[in-house]
Image (cartoon, helix red, strand yellow):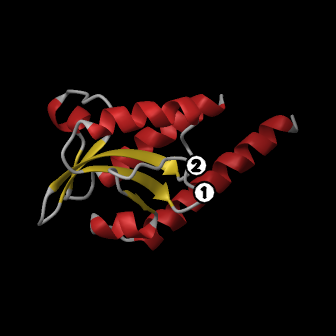
Amino acid sequence: MTRGLSTKMGRLWEEITDISPYVIIPEFEFGIKIKGVDVILRTKESIQFAQLKTLKGTLTGSQKDRAKKELGIHDNPLFIAAFNLGDWTFNDLKIPRIAGKAFWEQIHMDYNLVENNVRNMLQKIDQAFTELATK
């Protein structure tokens, strides 16, 4: 159940970032999946191919090597954690990382607005699970 929820939440972050004109989601825009790339960021300087995860510690041991391999084939790769929580489990000297407010500001979205709405959503989910568990 946790894995299913995590997958759905990852898709949610993609849908939220897709609001930004600085983000391209290949799957949404072109109907194609680029292996290892969730989002493409457009900046004045470059185009970055990125994986978008929920937290800094989202990846497990075996996933780290796969992420490095998949991102490493692209020019300007980037590893993103939507929220600046936990410790990084992804590290690579050639692939920069960004998390939380710094990421949302890079795509010109109000981090506080995103964070507040996500917090409210998670509290409602938690409350629903609590109610189900007590029945």
Q: How many marks?
A: 2
x then y, percent, for residue 103: 37, 63
Q: In which quarter of the image is the C terminus?
A: top right
Task: Report the residue that reaches farthest toward the right.
Answer: 134
Residue topped by disc 1:
87
**Is the C-beta separation of discs 2 and 1 under 8 Å?**
yes
In terms of sequence position, does the residue under pointer 2 or pointer 1 come before the other?
Answer: 2
Residue topped by disc 2:
57
**Residue drawn 58% across and 36% down?**
60
Q: In which quarter of the image is the N terminus?
A: top right
Q: In this picture, is 7 found above or below 123?
A: above
Report crowding for label 1: few under 14, some 14 to 19, many 20 or more residues within 10 A (C-alpha).
Answer: few
Rounded to the nearest angstrom, the CA distance separating label 2 from label 1 is 5 Å
Q: Inspect the image, locate mark 2, and give the three-letter code of the amino acid beneath it.
A: Gly
127 or 17, nearer to the observer: 17
**Residue drawn 31% across and 39% down?**
71
SS class of the residue under badge 1? loop
**Residue drawn 71% across and 44% down?**
128
Q: In this view, does 81 lie to the left or right of 120?
A: left
Q: Is residue 17 left or right of residue 6?
A: left
